[in-house]
Image (cartoon, rainbow, N blue to C red):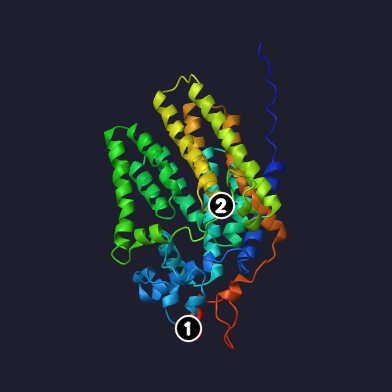
């Protein structure tokens, strides 16, 4: 006798409350980012110099990167750090030259960087298999403030780190090596991931390792080509670290902190970085002692990824020149570690969740800037010499008015 089966309950229609809340948060963050893109930066003057050099490359070619702005005609001597030549690797210069070719404004540059952060948030969610991690990245106060408001270009570096990780997980080892090489030519922090990538690529045989190395060399050809126009590596070596201040020193009572940070910033920077260092130490011990049933090669890859993140945290607290937006590199370095730990099986899912959250904690300190959101100094008053009839620089101004008052 056949017994009728119980009816299958219908699936609920519509979007769940959790998804509605996540979508609402994402849209609210986007609205705030766009609003901040439309005003002048308040805390950092770096973006002006980047866009000005980008516009000059479009007019005079990349050789201009070898010349300090102070040595040129017009009002370029009033641009911050104008006494030094361009002191970043070639990839950011190419990025800002491309932006300036479309629209040489602070608005366009920050819109582009915000778009990169949106792409990075999607990649974080895809690579970790955690949508909440992507949303967390998108809503990080450090990203909102230092990228969409102030125009720091860490998102460009993060994009290529995440692309390298994605390519590695899909077996595209040449692309992985090339992407990581490009990331290193934005800023140098991703060089810590080179041992992890080479190890992971070599596990696919000699061809895998050679493909990753070949990709890395192909990516580094950008630096070689740049040297035909200006001494890019020498400029980075000789003119970096123009400010000697560390916002995250081991000593929480360092006298320099009182000058550069509020008490709330100092407290959170110390608590969050020490918490991350402690979590990394504990996670590494558990990882190394775990008797995983998986191949030892997977464990070694995860160890190298954890080591890269740990070394960066140590550098964050030890080097003489560490600025607040450097914490934006932590999530980018944490994602390869999370992916590798997931493959090794040495840490549970909740522990990997904890790693991603711990890496995001230092980025919450920027909430102090977000809450204040008012200029402490009119940094844009120093951008252009005060000449009769010359308008102030704002987000919508063509930066070419700095040296050409007749620019559109």
Residue 201: % across, % down: 35, 36
Tell me if residue 292 comes above or below residue 30 in the rendering: above
Tell me if residue 216 comes above or below residue 226 in the rendering: above
The disc placed on residue 367 is: none
- SS for dot 1: loop
Left or right of residue 163, residue 259 in this image:
right
Badge 1 crowding class, 10 Å Cα cut-off, few under 14, some 14 to 19, many 20 or more, is some
The residue that disc 2 covers is 246
Please tell me which of labels 1 and 2 falls first in the chain: 2
Query: In the image, what residue occupies the spot 55% across and 75% down?
Result: 383
Residue 197: % across, % down: 39, 39
Left or right of residue 287, residue 40 in this image:
right
The residue that disc 1 covers is 404
Q: How many marks?
A: 2
Left or right of residue 336, residue 35 in this image:
right
What is the residue that sits farthest to the top in this orientation? 1
- SS for dot 2: loop
Tell me if residue 304 comes above or below residue 324 in the rendering: above
In front of the other: label 1 or label 2? Answer: 2
Q: Is residue 268 visible?
A: yes
Residue 166: % across, % down: 44, 42
Q: Is residue 170 visible?
A: no
- Which sits in the foreground, 8 or 334? 334
Query: In the image, what residue occupies the spot 70% across and 37% down?
Result: 12
How far is mark 1 from mark 2, CA to CA? 37 Å
Tell me if residue 129 comes above or below residue 111 in the rendering: above
The answer to whether mark 1 and mark 2 are in CB contact below 8 A is no
């Amino acid at each position: 006798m056949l017994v009728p089966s119980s009816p299958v309950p219908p699936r609920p229609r519509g979007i769940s409350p959790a998804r509605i809340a996540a979508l609402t948060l994402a849209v609210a963050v986007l609205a705030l980012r766009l609003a901040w893109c439309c005003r002048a930066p308040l805390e950092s003057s770096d973006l002006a110099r980047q866009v000005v050099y980008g516009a000059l490359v479009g007019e005079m070619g990349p050789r201009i990167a070898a010349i300090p702005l102070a040595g040129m005609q017009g009002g370029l001597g009033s641009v911050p750090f104008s006494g030094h030549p361009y002191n970043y690797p070639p990839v950011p210069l190419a990025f800002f030259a491309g932006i300036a070719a479309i629209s040489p404004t602070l608005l366009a540059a920050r819109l582009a960087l915000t778009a990169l952060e949106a792409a990075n948030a999607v990649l974080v969610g895809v690579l970790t298999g955690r949508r909440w991690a992507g949303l967390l990245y998108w809503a990080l106060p450090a990203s909102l403030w230092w990228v969409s408001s102030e125009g720091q270009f860490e998102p460009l570096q993060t994009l290529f780190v995440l692309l390298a990780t994605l390519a590695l997980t899909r077996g595209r080892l040449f692309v992985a090596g090339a992407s990581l090489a490009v990331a290193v030519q934005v800023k140098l922090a991703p060089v810590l991931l080179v041992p992890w990538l080479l190890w992971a690529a070599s596990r696919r045989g000699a061809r895998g390792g050679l493909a990753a190395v070949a990709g890395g060399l192909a990516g580094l050809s950008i630096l070689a080509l740049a040297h035909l126009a200006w001494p890019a590596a020498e400029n980075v070596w000789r003119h970096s670290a123009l400010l000697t201040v560390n916002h995250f020193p081991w000593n929480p009572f360092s006298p320099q902190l009182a000058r550069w940070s509020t008490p709330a910033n100092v407290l959170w920077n110390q608590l969050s970085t020490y918490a991350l260092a402690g979590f990394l130490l504990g996670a590494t011990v558990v990882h190394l002692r775990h008797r995983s049933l998986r191949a030892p090669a997977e464990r070694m890859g995860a160890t190298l990824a954890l080591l890269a993140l740990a070394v960066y945290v140590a550098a964050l607290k030890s080097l003489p020149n560490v600025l607040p937006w450097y914490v934006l590199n932590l999530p980018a370095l944490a994602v390869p570690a999370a992916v590798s730990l997931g493959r090794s099986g040495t840490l549970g899912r909740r522990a990997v969740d904890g790693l991603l959250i711990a890496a995001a904690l230092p980025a919450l300190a920027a909430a102090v800037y977000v809450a204040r959101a008012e200029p402490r100094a009119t940094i844009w008053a120093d951008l252009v010499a005060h000449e009769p009839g010359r308008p102030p620089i704002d987000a919508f101004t063509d930066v070419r008015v700095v040296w050409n008052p007749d620019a559109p």
